[in-house]
């Protein structure tokens, strides 16, 4: 019986807001990895790891990307972000979000 498991279906993972910004100008290597980056983010979204991704126009000199990520802790988010094909070109600010329910 489901009543025997009152926490069944409850998501125990935290939410993190990640703001990424470039740490240097895009070069040919960067540009060659953009499609791989987007494919990985799409895969993570399908898996429920990334809940949301938005970014500024790619040519913006003050470019930022915004992710909402489900993870156990900040270290797990850092490990995940290190897998991104463009990780060496990016700096990340990671903030845990509160569990406010509307």
Image (tube, helix red, strand yellow):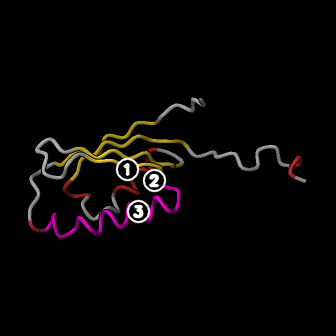
Residue marked by disc 2: 50
Q: Residue 83, image x and y in percent?
A: 35, 63
The secondary element bearing badge 3 is classed as: helix
Q: Earlier in the sequence, mark 2 or mark 3?
A: 3
Q: Is residue 86 above or below residue 52?
A: below
| Disc 1 secondary structure class | strand
Q: Residue at x 24, y 60 (%)?
A: 86
Find residue 13 and report its horizontal and vertical position in percent: 58, 46
Spatial CA span between label 2 and label 3: 8 Å
**Image height of 101 relative to 62, above or below:** above
- Specify start and end residues of the magenta stretch as a single range: 29-49
Q: Which residue is mark 3?
A: 42
What is the magenta segment's predominant secondary structure? helix
Distance (Cα) linking label 1 and label 2: 7 Å
State the residue position of label 1. 53
Quarter occupied by the N terminus = bottom right
Q: Nearer the viewer, residue 55 or 29?
A: 55
Residue count near mark 3 (Cα–Cα under 10 Å), binned few <14, some 14–19, many ≥20 = some
User: Is 45 part of what is drawn in magenta?
Assistant: yes
Residue drawn where x is 22% and y is 68% of the image: 33
Q: Are marks 1 and 2 in contact (CB under 8 Å)?
A: yes
Q: Quadrant of residue 63?
A: top left
Rendered residue at 22%/51% (across/down): 90
Quadrant location, the C terminus? top right
């Amino acid at each position: 019986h489901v009543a025997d498991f009152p926490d069944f279906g409850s998501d125990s993972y935290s939410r993190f807001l990640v703001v990424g910004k470039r740490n240097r100008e895009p070069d040919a290597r960067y540009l060659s990895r953009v499609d791989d980056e987007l494919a990985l983010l799409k895969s993570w979204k399908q898996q429920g790891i990334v809940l949301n991704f938005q970014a500024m126009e790619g040519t913006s000199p003050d470019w930022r990307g915004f992710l909402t990520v489900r993870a156990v802790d900040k270290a797990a988010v850092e490990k995940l972000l290190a897998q991104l094909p463009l990780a060496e070109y990016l700096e990340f600010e990671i903030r845990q979000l509160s569990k406010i329910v509307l």
